Image: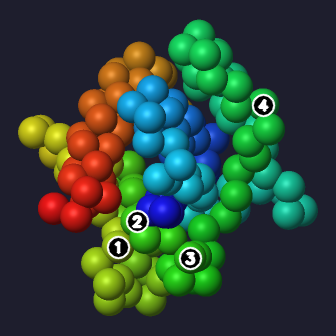
Amino acid sequence: MIKILFVCHGNICRSPMAEFVFRQMAEQDGLAEQFDVASAATTEEEIWNGYGNPVYPPVERLLRAHGMDPSEKRAALLTAGDYDVYDYFIGMDDENLRDMKRIFHGDPDQKCSLLMDYTANPRPVADPWYTRDFQRTWDDVQEGCRGLLDVLRGDEDGH
């Protein structure tokens, strides 16, 4: 089983969106059992007294409109110990990538990458918290997750 952790700043917009989208794509492709998927934050900004905030309402609405239920998802914090648990850490932008490597004290096994690096047009996934353009973020996440799944499907097949 391939273990994937999607990562962003607060774990209420982009990374949970990617977590649910990737999981749904894997299920639709008949590959759900091949992946263990979760998401986490590089900061505690959305975590209070150890309890994470839910998915941001506009993101929740998008997920629900596409048949996904994020109601149980709460923001979680990325920890150094996660490096030994997951196979891939997929960040949304360069700041996430820097923060992941800082938390892990490096990336000796080259497990950290950016979601849009798996597309024909590598770029950051715009943070809808600031852009307010949730559809653009949704489109990026769809494209990135499809590219990632295609790459990992090849990896799972031993290519």
The structure residue drawn at horizontal position 56% and vertical position 76%, both measured from the top left corner, is 85
Circle 1 residue? 111
Q: CA distance from mark 1 to mark 2?
A: 5 Å
The percent coordinates of residue 116 (x first, y second) are: 25, 45
> Which type of secondary structure does the marked residue at label 1 adopt?
loop
Residues at circles 2 and 4 in contact by the CB criterion of under 8 Å: no
Which residue, given by chain and number where applicable, does mark 3 sit on? 85
Task: Examine the rendered structure and indicate whether residue 141 appears above or below residue 90.
Answer: above
Q: Are marks 1 and 3 in contact (CB under 8 Å)?
A: no
Q: Which residue is mark 4?
A: 71
Label 2 Cα crowd, 10 Å radius (few <14 / some 14-19 / many 20+):
some
Q: Is residue 6 left or right of residue 93?
A: right
* Residue under the image location 47 percent in, 53 percent down: 34
**Looking at the image, which residue is at 28% across and 49% down?**
153
Label 3 CA crowd tier, 10 Å (few <14, some 14–19, many 20+): few
What residue appears at the point 31 percent right and 58 percent down from the top-left corner?
Answer: 156
Could you tell whether 138 is left or right of 3 in the image? left
Crowd around label 4: few <14 · some 14–19 · many ≥20 (10 Å): few
Residue 117, position as x, y percentages in the image? 20, 51
Q: Earlier along the polypeptide chain: callout 2 or callout 4? A: 4
Q: How is the image coloured?
A: rainbow
In the visual, does 72 lie left or right of 134?
right
Question: In this rendering, does residue 17 appear at all?
Answer: no
